[in-house]
Amino acid sequence: MSAIEAPVAPRRPPPLTRSSRPRTVGRLGTVLTVATLVVVSAVVLLPFVWMVSASFRTQGDLTGNPTTLWPATITFDNYVNIWQRIPFGRQLLNTVAFAGTVTAVSVLLDAMAAYALARFQFPGRGVIFVLIIVTLMLPIQVTFVPVYNLLADLGWINSLHGLVIPRVADAFGIFFLRQAFLSVPVELEDAARIDGASEWRIFFRVMLPLTGPALLTVALFNLLANWNDLLWPLMVTTDPSMQTLPAGLALFKGEHVSDYGLLMAGALLALLPMVAVFLFVQRRFIEGIATTGLK
Amino acid sequence: MSAPQRLLPRRSERTITATLAGPRPVPRVRVLRRSSIQRRRTRTAAAFLAPASLVLGVFVLYPMLDALRASFTDARIIGPADWVGLANYAELLADDRFWNALWNTALYAVVTAPLSVAIALGLALMLNRAVPARLLFRAIIFFPFVTSLSLVSIAWAFLFDPQVGTAAAWLSQVGLPIGNGINDPQWAMPAVMLVGIWRNIGFFMVMFLAGLQSIPRELKEAAAVDGAAGFRHFRTMTWPLLANTTMFVVVIAAIFAFQAFDQMYVMTGGGPFFSTETLVMYIYDTGFEQYRTGYASAVSWALVLVVLTISIGQLWYFRKRAVQY
């Protein structure tokens, strides 16, 4: 919480300021800053505003009055038709199952690996850590063709487990959680160990609860990355009924370029769950990200 | 270095831990009968590591090496593959489409990475002050980062569409016609660049905000006492002390830029006339549209070389400028 909030609130003048140069920004400065921020925010929100507007407009209205964001008449047809034009319900379920499973499993597996790397000394630890850094730095795209071949050999193309299993551990999560475990005092585990707790018990009952915010950050990163991902589902699935929403809607756009309102209704429905998640944990998530970039 | 740490054999590991990962793990107290305890702890560690290692080994590390092997063959998606030595790489060097994709990738990176970092820093400096509605502005600017780039790219494509594009229509009303919008070779690249910047500035801004707030208050006050204000305060105090955050953000921005795919795929499909085809798009096209596995692997490894060279160059450059306070 404090990372972003605390230091800013008390903006009192420094105690020993030399009188010649007060370090206040001034009212004009504040007005200019707010004006800039309002303009930037408007540009940032423009595509979302357009999406909402277009999703309630008819095709004729959209092409006839391109300069306005305001619908001439409001229609709900787009929201009704999208469920028939593509297997929207099925793709929504696929997205939930894919992103949800990957998130839940990968947080657990990443945390386990991170705990071993942070707290155990064993032969080969250095090599494993270097390999994790390497997978973090190399562009993941280099793996795509061989992974596709591997999945094809296994018969996992167009299947949910084909989408999920290759994704259930990620180098970033391990790296990030290792940092979190390193910051937990060793005394806490040692106390539990003296009380006779097993390593698994220590991990689940002591370490995981103590690193809750870091786990939440990794979970949210995973949820967003997988829910929003385009290239991976595009690769692993060819059957529309196995696709996730980003892939399904992108392909639909490729085939029916001009169904603007319909596409926007679908895209908005696909965005909504992540928007809800964002609004719900916005502050903690932003602060969790912020700590990854610290010193 | 105490005794237990000497058990760790590799120098390379030590350097990486020290530079990338901050504090080393605390050395554990050893008791008698070390070997049996040590063996048991090794087994436990292996059990903790096994699932993630298996997944990363099978689906990340092995494919990376397999791509390297495949890049020396004429593999296609089906059928036998023959060893062709460096033929794919020779073809690459003579392939105009590869050079075009490399150029587009470099251009995209050179424009979007510095611009998005600069805009993010500017916004962070503004939001680090006591302005009204700070949290609201911060949330709005960060918001694109949580949305699906491919889905919002559909909206961006329509905004710049010559027929229904609201942004295109507005721009031509104020005397800035953008012709055929994203169907215009001249405007397609700027459009996908804009979307890339739009997507990432909030993420970078949040990191800069955290960096700004980790600057110790005493230093700020000392600078104020010395009479530093405005731009001079930024140049002599804030900017040098932000070096570590800036390094992190610049490296990430470059990696993001070299891996750009979504908005090109959705908005332009790499067109018009390949003007927005990046290396990742070219890999996707050769590998999954033309099914030329071997050649696509060679393009992938060309991308690896480019990204590694740039990342290592950046880390080397910034390492000398890292600050501690």
Image: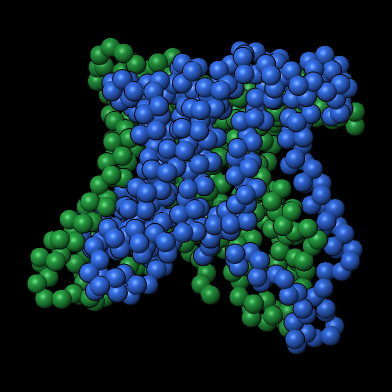
Residue B41: quadrant of the picture: bottom left
**B29 and A40: which is toward the camera:** B29
Residue A25 is situated, as x and y percent measured from the top left of the image, at 83, 69
| Residue B92 relative to residue A11: left or right | left
Q: Residue at x 60, y 40 (%)?
A: A274
Residue B72 is situated, as x and y percent measured from the top left of the image, at 29, 25
Chain in green on the image: B
A33 w.r.t. B66: above or below: below
**B101 and A189: which is toward the camera:** A189
User: Taking the image as drawn, is residue A282 in sight?
Assistant: yes
Give chain A's shade.
blue
Q: Residue at x 69, y 25 (%)?
A: A265
B197 w.r.t. B287: above or below: below
**B313 and A54: which is toward the camera:** A54
User: Taking the image as drawn, is residue B73 in sight?
Assistant: no
Residue lying farthest bottom? A16
Q: Residue at x 64, y 60 (%)?
A: B209
